[in-house]
Image (tube, rainbow, N blue to C red):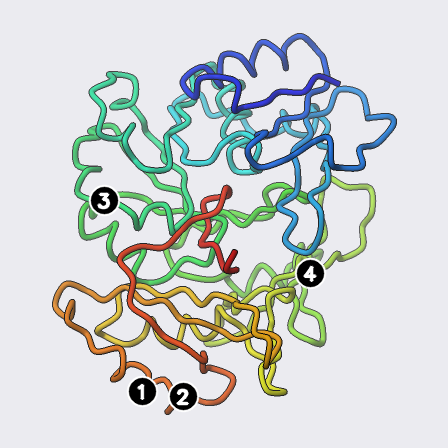
């Protein structure tokens, strides 16, 4: 197996360099040395042939290599008209999927710096991007009006995090004819589904097919049955969901629930409640270690422009009116959120 360290190469060359390795027929493991210290991990003695391996996110433990047969990855439908730009890097499933689509279409893939600086460039190839993919958090860090310069842009795919109505409305305000897709995927299972109706959550029909891909466990965890795996059993995804008005909504990660004062709380559920306040543009709830309580939750909020002088004390008073399981112990105003290597909001204080 060949090890492909993205940090040792120029971002603009990732596609061409990876293409050469994959077409050579070698198995490859893609990683970033800034994220993964390979020397500290227990790696398999033997690896499957003709595979591409990426590391799992390591949310609940040490990252581990996840192997995907090249034949399965290349079974995706060919889409020759696509010119892809992605904020993901190819050591993440979404970036790997973009790479594969580029290989099949014969078009280069533009791996865009998460700061968005590449979108501001005058590179003629970048301006020809037809489909852009990113996490919702990545799209929130810059003025969406920059997308007006991309005359060929037809669709944006959001993934990695739950999509909010505000995310969709913001993109539609700038580009009313833009198609907005949601991709639900993971390192282990690959792409699980694509939602194209421009609404948050998953349609309930996905759970009612004669042989459905999805199910929900008794404790509200989303289960998935992959069509690419020999095992036909439903497997846990770690995502908690709820059903409302014919729609299945993501409410949080099972492994991120925190017990505070004997009350089990979901950071994502608290975020949803706070984001509904008109003065707040965005919110992330972080987990902080406490010597007294074990853990406490800190809500960081970004005020919208009309309420930049927002009083934190007023927000805290309003939060105390929420049910106990929707309350954080602290709230503070920030200008921006820190994102992790996967382009998602970092939920734990270092």
Discs 1, 4 touching: Cβ within 8 Å: no
Q: Nearer the viewer, mark 2 or mark 4?
A: 2
Query: In which quadrant is the N terminus drawn?
Result: top right
Few, some or many C-alpha atoms within 10 Å of disc 3 (few <14, some 14-19, many ≥20)? Answer: few
Q: Of callouts 2 and 3, which one flags the residue occurring earlier in the amino acid sequence?
A: 3
The residue pinned by badge 4 equals: 223
Residue at the extreme front: 291
| Front one among 138 and 180 | 138
Residue at 59%, 81% in the rendered image: 292
Vertical side of 323 occupied by 311: above or below: above
Q: Residue 322 carries which label?
A: 2
| Front one among 96 and 256 | 256
Q: Nearer the viewer, mark 3 or mark 4?
A: 4
Q: Distance between the residues labelled 2 and 3?
A: 38 Å
Discs 1, 2 touching: Cβ within 8 Å: yes
Q: Distance between the residues labelled 1 and 3?
A: 38 Å
Q: Of callouts 2 and 4, which one flags the residue occurring earlier in the amino acid sequence?
A: 4
Q: Which mark is residue 318?
A: 1
Q: Distance between the residues labelled 2 and 4?
A: 30 Å
Discs 3, 4 touching: Cβ within 8 Å: no
Discs 1, 3 touching: Cβ within 8 Å: no
| Front one among 56 and 164 | 56
The residue pinned by badge 3 equals: 177
């Amino acid at each position: 197996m060949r090890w492909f360290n993205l940090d040792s190469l120029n971002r603009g060359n990732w596609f061409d360099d990876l293409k050469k390795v994959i077409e050579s027929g070698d198995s490859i493991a893609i990683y970033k040395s800034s994220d993964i210290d390979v020397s500290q991990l227990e790696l398999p003695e033997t690896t499957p042939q003709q595979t591409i391996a990426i590391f799992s996110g390591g949310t609940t433990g040490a990252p581990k290599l996840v192997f995907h047969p090249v034949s399965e990855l290349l079974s995706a439908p060919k889409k020759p008209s696509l010119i892809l730009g992605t904020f993901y890097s190819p050591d993440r499933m979404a970036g790997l999927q973009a790479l594969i689509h580029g290989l099949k279409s014969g078009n280069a893939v533009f791996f865009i710096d998460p700061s968005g600086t590449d979108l501001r460039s005058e590179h003629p190839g970048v301006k020809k991007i037809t489909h852009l993919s990113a996490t919702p958090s990545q799209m929130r860090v810059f003025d969406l009006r920059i997308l007006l310069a991309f005359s060929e842009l037809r669709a944006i795919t959001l993934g990695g995090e739950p999509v909010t109505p505000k995310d969709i409305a913001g993109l539609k305000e700038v580009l009313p004819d833009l198609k907005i897709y949601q991709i639900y995927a993971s390192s282990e299972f690959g792409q699980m589904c694509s939602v194209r109706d421009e609404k948050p959550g998953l349609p309930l029909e996905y759970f009612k097919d004669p042989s459905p891909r999805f199910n929900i466990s008794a404790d509200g965890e989303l289960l998935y049955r992959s069509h690419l795996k020999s095992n036909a059993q439903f497997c846990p995804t770690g995502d908690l969901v709820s059903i409302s008005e014919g729609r299945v909504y993501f409410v949080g990660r099972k492994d991120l629930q925190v017990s505070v004062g004997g009350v089990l709380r979901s950071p994502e559920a608290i975020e949803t409640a706070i984001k509904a306040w008109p003065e707040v543009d965005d919110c992330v709830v972080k987990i902080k270690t406490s010597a007294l309580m074990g853990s406490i939750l800190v809500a960081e909020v970004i005020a919208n422009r009309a309420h930049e002088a927002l009083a934190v004390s007023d927000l805290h008073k309003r939060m105390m009116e929420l049910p106990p399981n929707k309350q954080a112990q602290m709230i503070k105003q920030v200008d921006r959120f820190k994102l992790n290597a996967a382009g998602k909001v970092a939920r734990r204080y270092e």
